[in-house]
C-alpha cells in the first residue's frame, strides 16, 4: 500500500480523533500545520499515525528515494539539571548514583571503536550539566575531527 492509500485509509478511520483527522487532511492537501497542531501531534499522535504522515510527505517530496547514513551515538552523561517530559533515560542530579558521566578519553575510545566501520556521523546526545560547557564540547568536537576528519558531528 503506497503512502497516499495509507493516508486515505487513515482519513476514513471513524475512530480517529477529529483534531488528528484535521491535521491529516491538511497534510494530504499539502497545507502547513500550525504550531498548536504540532503540539497536538507531540502530545497525542501515536507513532504509527506520525509515520503515515511523515512517509506521505517524504514520498510527495522525494518519490521513492530515501537516504540513510550510518551513525553511532555518544552519550556524555545521563545526569541532567532538567526534567524534560520527552526524555526516556535521564536522571536528575539528585539521582547521581543511578547515572554516569563519561570522560573525554572514554568518549574518544567510543569513536575509535568504530574505526573499521563505514559510519558517516557521530550523534552526541545526553543530559545537561554545567561542567559539560561549550568549551568542553568544542574540545570534544575538535578531538573527534582530529581522529576522524570526514565524520559529521551532530550534537
Image (tube, rainbow, N blue to C red):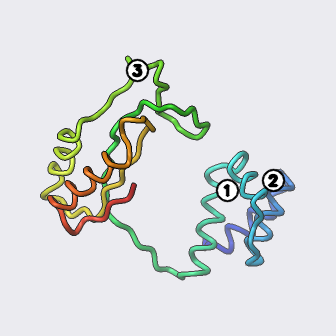
- Upstream in the sequence, badge 3 or badge 2? 2
Q: Secondary structure at mark 2?
A: loop
Q: Is residue 121 left or right of residue 37?
A: left
Using the rendered view, name the quadrant where residue 115 is placed: bottom left
Q: Which residue is mark 1?
A: 49
Compared to residue 118, the image places residue 39 above or below, namely above
- Disc 3 crowd, CA 10 A, few/some/many (<14, 14-19, 20+): few
Using the rendered view, name the quadrant where residue 82 is placed: top right
Residue drawn at x 71%, y 45% as measured from the top left:
43
* In the foreground, 6 or 118: 118
Residue 150 position, x and y percent, is: 22, 69
Compared to residue 10, the image places residue 126 above or below, namely above
Q: Are marks 2 and 1 in contact (CB under 8 Å)?
A: yes
Q: Are marks 3 and 2 in contact (CB under 8 Å)?
A: no
Distance between mark 2 and mark 1 Cα atoms: 10 Å
Disc nearest the viewer among 3 and 2: 3
Q: Is residue 31 left or right of residue 59?
A: right
Q: Quadrant of the C terminus?
A: bottom left
Q: Secondary structure at mark 1?
A: helix
Residue 54 position, x and y percent, is: 61, 66
Compared to residue 7, the image places residue 131 above or below, namely above
Residue 119 position, x and y percent, is: 25, 62
Q: Quadrant of the N terminus?
A: bottom right
Q: Is residue 109 left or right of residue 132?
A: left
Residue 96 badge: 3
- Disc 2 crowd, CA 10 A, few/some/many (<14, 14-19, 20+): few
Residue 16 badge: 2
- Upstream in the sequence, badge 1 or badge 3? 1
- Upstream in the sequence, badge 2 or badge 1? 2
Q: Secondary structure at mark 3?
A: helix
Amino acid at each position: 500500500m503506497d503512502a497516499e492509500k495509507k493516508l486515505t485509509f487513515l482519513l476514513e478511520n471513524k475512530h480517529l480523533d477529529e483534531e488528528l483527522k484535521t491535521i491529516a487532511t491538511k497534510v494530504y492537501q499539502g497545507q502547513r500545520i500550525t504550531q498548536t497542531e504540532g503540539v497536538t501531534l507531540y502530545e497525542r499522535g501515536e507513532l504509527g499515525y506520525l509515520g503515515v504522515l511523515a512517509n506521505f510527505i517524504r514520498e510527495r517530496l522525494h518519490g521513492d528515494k530515501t537516504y540513510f547514513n550510518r551513525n553511532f551515538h555518544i552519550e556524555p552523561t545521563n545526569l541532567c539539571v532538567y526534567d524534560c517530559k520527552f526524555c526516556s533515560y535521564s536522571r536528575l542530579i539528585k539521582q547521581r548514583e543511578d547515572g554516569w558521566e563519561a570522560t573525554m578519553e572514554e568518549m574518544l575510545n567510543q569513536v575509535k571503536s568504530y574505526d573499521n566501520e563505514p559510519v558517516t556521523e557521530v550523534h552526541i546526545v545526553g543530559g545537561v550539566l554545567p561542567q559539560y560547557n561549550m568549551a568542553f564540547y568544542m574540545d570534544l568536537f575538535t578531538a573527534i575531527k582530529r581522529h576522524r576528519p570526514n565524520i559529521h558531528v551532530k550534537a
